[in-house]
Amino acid sequence: MLPVTAQRINPSILSADFVNLQAELEAIATADLVHVDVMDNHFVPNLTMGPPIVERIQAVSPIPLDMHLMITDADRWAPGYAEMGAYSVTFHAEATGDPVRLARRIRDIGARAGIALKPGTDPEPYLELLPEFDQVLVMTVEPGFGGQSFMPDMMPKLRRFAEARRRSGLDVWLQVDGGISKDTIGIAAEAGADTFVAGSAVYGGVPEERIAELRRAAATHQH
């Protein structure tokens, strides 16, 4: 199954009930991908899950995995998540010594390669590298915790990537993660995002209804 919708909604299972994770995955079957946050308590001050849990998620999820690795030494660990069968593997620009080499390795394994930028990271060095990536994740909160408020001042950064994509004609997904809700998703869509990570905005109600609501809100504003 491949994501084909124009407004990709990727629920974050960071907001799910981990005791009933398989049921929580089945509840978001109408989404495009499931966003899986891996945190190591080093790159960010929080600890979530590692390869054994991700392997089980991969085995039972009704939709493909969109991995977001908030970990140090991404060069060493990121390829392993591609080898597990994840559809997309995103590593942080701040956690790799050679983003192009790592992206190529992930692609060689068969996954989509994504690069994530923290709010304080300058986008300039990565604009010319767009052909090396399948996805750019512009963080709209500081990575490491769920439930933070959306940072609208990240929209100029997102627009720069959107303009670079337009000029190049590349099919690069532009993802936003952090504080995405029915009230903020339109702001990100208008700035060029097409892939949206939402946690509490999905799991805070009936997931299928929330996913449809977010998709409609994004479509209204997407260029």
Image (tube, grey):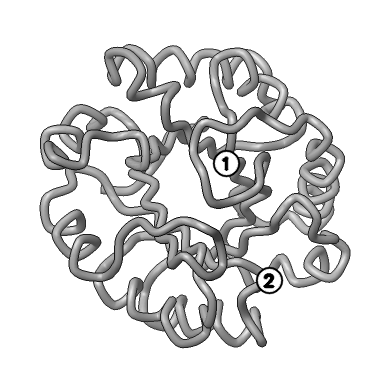
Q: Position of residue 114 (x, y in %)?
A: 55, 63
Q: In this view, does 82 lie above or below 11?
A: below
Quadrant housing the C terminus: top right
Q: Mark 2 points at which residue?
A: 94
Cα separation, mark 2 vs mark 1, equals: 16 Å
Q: Mark 1 points at which residue?
A: 177
Side (left or right) of 204 relative to 100:
left
Q: Determine the residue positioned at 14% across, 59% down.
A: 56
Side (left or right) of 32 relative to 170:
left
Side (left or right) of 15 relative to 74:
left
Q: Position of residue 30 (x, y in %)?
A: 28, 28
Q: Where is residue 100 in the image (x, y as percent from the top left)?
A: 65, 81
10 Å crowding of disc 2: few (<14), some (14-19), many (20+): some
Q: Determine the residue positioned at 46% across, 58% down.
A: 68
Side (left or right) of 116 relative to 27:
right
Q: Which of marks 2 and 1 is nearer the N terminus?
A: 2
10 Å crowding of disc 1: few (<14), some (14-19), many (20+): many
Q: Is residue 169 above or below residue 109?
A: above
Helix, strand or loop under label 1: strand
Q: Position of residue 104 (x, y in %)?
A: 54, 82
Q: Determine the residue positioned at 41% across, 53% down.
A: 37
Q: Determine the residue positioned at 41% across, 39% down.
A: 4
Helix, strand or loop under label 2: helix
**Image quadrant assignment for residue 109:** bottom left
**The disc label shown at residue 198, or none:** none
Amino acid type assigned to the residue bearing label 1 in the image? Asp
Amino acid type assigned to the residue bearing label 2 in the image? Glu
Q: In this view, does 103 lie above or below 201?
A: below
Q: Which of 115 and 133 is in front in this view?
A: 115
Q: Nearer the viewer, residue 146 or 67?
A: 146
